[in-house]
Amino acid sequence: MLEARVTKALGEFRLEAELTTGSGRVTALFGPSGAGKSTLAHCLAGLIDPDRGRVALDGVELFNSETGIRVAPERRRIGFIFQDARLFPHLSVKGNLEYGLVRTPAAERRVEFDPVVALLDLAGLLSRRPRTLSGGEKQRVAFGRAVLTSPKLLIMDEPLASLDAARKSEILPFIERLRDELAIPIIYVSHVIEEILRLADDVVVFSHGKVVRAGPAVETLNAATVVHGADGDPASVIEAVVEGQDPGDGLTALAFAGERIFVPAIAGRAGDRIRLRIRARDVALALSKPHDISVLNILAGRITEITAGGDGHTDVRLDIGGGLWARITRRSANQLSLRVGQEVYALIKSVAIDRGGTGAGG
């Protein structure tokens, strides 16, 4: 367990954050750029010192401003992965990997070389130098080097930020392997909700240097303070279970909120838990269940919240799953005479559910 309470001023920016990790394998620090996520991550790893506060890992204090405790970064047993790989250019891939391994006393090693090489598919790269690697390959080597220090905690600070979309898709499965096959808790820093959806068990939401929400991923991401993001466009995060695939129609059937919904084909076997992000603007409302309509997903629900926007729209939240948002025009809301407690039907076009907004639940 990681416990932290830190204050840090950097120019006009001020971080005042508390963090306690739960039992989940991945705790995500989520929020817009400049919110304080990376500053906290650097404080945890000892790369910068808080002005005041305390950091403890598994009950061992790493920093305490009151007692003067300050454990050096290399002695904290925390592996840190930066946005760029930061490999040693004069060493081969094997040399970079062994750098972490040989600096860990044998008695403290919990991770061995060959399994990590296999896990990250690095066998064919061992003799190469960093300058010959692609961005994705470099980052996989960086993952391996950090893991081979047998850390008690692994911090990933925006590890995909420097990669293009294709390389991100290449790397995400390797992060999932690290999460699923190694017993190393991960702090994952990102401002990209699709990454959080796919990887995180718990989410800590940052805004202006403070933690504004924390808890299980789906519940936290569905909070009103989160779904109304910087773009002003709310979205809903739902967790569903794969029922089956329909290759002929290119659809995947999911069980959600006591109903079956269809989404564009996504990888998954029957029984797998899947998270989806559905944009409010892709949800329409009806007072009665429509028939003879092309929309496949029609869900019954009750209105729990109505929020009028300043630009002619109205946001409506339904008690479907963890809370499903719909964004409609103010005129439509008035014509339907919508009110809290009213029963309505949510219409979600299957093709509107972006495959990029799906991810396996952690």
Image: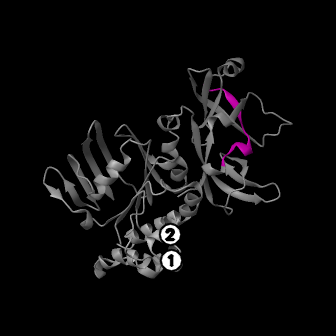
For the residues carrying marks 1 and 2, which lies nearer the camera in this image? 2
Q: How is the image coloured?
A: one colour
Where does residue 65 sit, x and y in percent of width and height?
16, 50
In front here: 107 or 147?
147
Q: Secondary structure at mark 2?
A: loop
Q: Is 344 colored magenta in this rendering?
A: yes
> Which residue is painted at 30% across and 58% down in the image?
45
- Whichever of callouts 1 and 2 sits on the residue coming sooner in the sequence is 1
In front here: 294 or 80?
80
Label 2 sits on residue: 133
- Say left or right for 245 vs 41: right
Range shown magenta:
340-354
- Say left or right for 164 vs 269: left
In this rendering, is residue 183 above or below 298?
A: below
Residue type (three-letter) at the residue carrying disc 1? Leu
Q: Which mark is residue 207?
A: none
Local crowd size for mark 1, using a 10 Å CA cut-off: few (<14), some (14–19), many (≥20): some
Residue type (three-letter) at the residue carrying disc 2? Leu
> Which residue is painted at 28% across and 51% down in the image?
4
Q: Quadrant of residue 326?
A: top right
In front here: 103 or 131?
131
Cα separation between marks 1 and 2: 8 Å
Label 1 sits on residue: 125
Q: Secondary structure at mark 1?
A: helix
Give yes or no for contact between labels 1 and 2 (Cβ–Cβ under 8 Å).
Answer: yes
Residue at the extreme left: 67
Where does residue 61 sit, x and y in percent of width and height?
22, 59
In this rendering, is residue 161 above or below 316?
A: below
> Which residue is painted at 72% across and 47% down in the image?
261
